[in-house]
Image (cartoon, grey):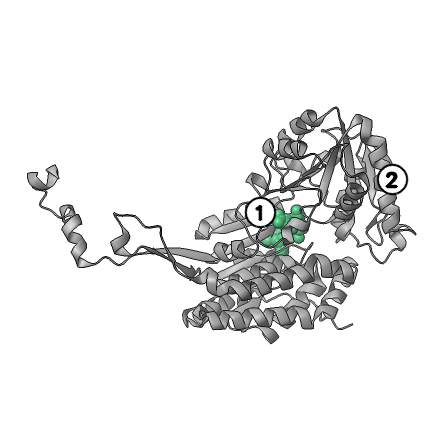
Amino acid sequence: MTVPKFTSTPIDEIPVIRENLRRAFRTGRSKSIAYRKQQLLALAYMIKDNAARLHEALDLDLHRAPSETNFIEIFPSLAEAKEAYDSVGKWSKPERVHWSFNWFAMNPTIRKEAKGVVLIISPFNYPITLSLGPLSGAIAAGNACVLKPSELTPAYSALLAELVPQYLDPEMYTVINGAIPETTEMLKLQWDHILYTGGARVASIILGAAAKTLTPVTTEACHPPSSWFLLHLGGKSPVFIDPKCDLKMTAKRLMWGKVTNAGQTCIAPDYVLVPRSFVDTFVTACIEALKEFFPDGAEKSDSYARVISPGHFKRIKALLDGTRGAVAYGGSTNEDTKFIEPTLVVGVKNDDSLMSEEIFGPVLPILVVEDVNEALEIVNSRDHPLALYVFSRDAAYKAKVFDNTQSGACVANDCIVHYATEGLPFGGIGPSGSGMQGGKFSFDTFTHFRGTLDNPKWVDIILGGRYAPFTPKKQAS
Ligand code: NAD
């Protein structure tokens, strides 16, 4: 085993770390584009050189197959570092505002400046992408940064703490490891920005703490506690199925979205809305796709991850045990190995246990609807989801769904892939999150847009009226 042991950062060191980063930031060396590019390149090499160790860590933490980790984490994180490397010069350029007769002489310009020392708090499920993706944005914007990865992925978090100082400027970028006590200590301090990705319960703790220090926060949440039943259902991403879809492709892509990382994806398809006459055909196609993925069953497959913790296992199992729908496929579990079989449940109603919170596991409830209008009603009776999916070959059907719903993102004929698509923002709306990340959007999140102008003396010929005394002549003009 080449993965180091997880150790928490001593709590009394946390304020010192923040202070040291502030000092490093004030040296001004992260202002240079050459420095940022060098750090971004080093970040890319950190990921590339250590892909095998990252695979090992993710196997230990999540029983995740290397190919899956490559596709959902390593390639997107590398692409994000590369995009930031290629674009940082362009993104950082001061922007002249549009020409206007009243103001042009003052040369109004927006300077793109680093916010300072920023904090990235990330969850367990996509530990690489959700820490190193935003880190690319933070570096590109010229910030110093603390990464706080999840204690639920101890192998990855320990490896990250080892690698970051080896590859990046250790005075400017650092990892703080730990769980609630360490994060609570961090939240007592003022940061120049916090980007938090994780569940809604913790999001409100972070927002509450940040309010006390007036720290700006971007929240990429949510996975609401079940006690918020039908109030905050942010990440619960619905899928509209048009019977005129390409059935085989739909089933394959949808099942891929549900079984990837054993369903522990914030934008996983959470529930499906299928017209009554199409349910049997649709379910049969989904079962065929699952059998194709795991010919000997998911439990024996090396291509299928496990649920992260006993707590999450129990939570998903309880949702499954509580359903009044009928299990059409799967349903088996193993508490010792935290295995939950890819499971399809049909005939689920809007008030079922499986609809009470984001499932965040490999269980797919299928709701039977009469038509697309009923499906729209169900989706619109809930909080705006993080993603919304539609499978159809009919442009009018897709437009109807997109035009009559709200969500963080809306995607036709695939799922999940949009989070890694260059140029698209990633973020929620309302309870599913605030603010955006991904490429330039991460750069903007960590950038202060500082308005500036330089007003020449002669402009007083036009604006002299602002000075007292306000004589009748001045007041008349
Ligand atoms: P979590 O909210 O439990 O933990 C996230 C981070 O918060 C961790 O680093 C953890 O150490 C810290 N934390 C936990 N409890 C805390 C507390 N009381 N005070 C301060 N900090 C605390 O999330 P998780 O279980 O690791 O991740 C799964 C959740 O993340 C899911 O709900 C999923 O929907 C959500 N998620 C959202 C997105 C998105 O972009 N919207 C992406 C991935 C995951």
Element type at marker 1?
A: loop
Q: Quadrant of residue 393?
A: top right
Q: Which mark is residue 329?
A: 2
Image quadrant occupied by the C terminus? top left
For the N terminus, the quadrant is: bottom right
Q: Residue furthest right?
A: 296
Residue 97 visible in the current orientation: yes
Q: Give me the C-alpha separation between circle 2 and circle 1.
A: 32 Å
Q: Which mark is residue 427?
A: 1
* Circle on res. 401: none
| Residue plotted at (54% across, 54% down) | 195
Amino acid at the residue labelled 2: Tyr
Q: Nearer the viewer, residue 429 or 122?
A: 429
Residue at left offset 30%, top offset 48%: 100
Report if the CB atoms under discs 2 and 1 are less than 8 Å apart: no
Crowd tier of the residue under label 2, counting other residues whose Cα lies within 10 Å: few below 14, some 14–19, many 20 or above: some
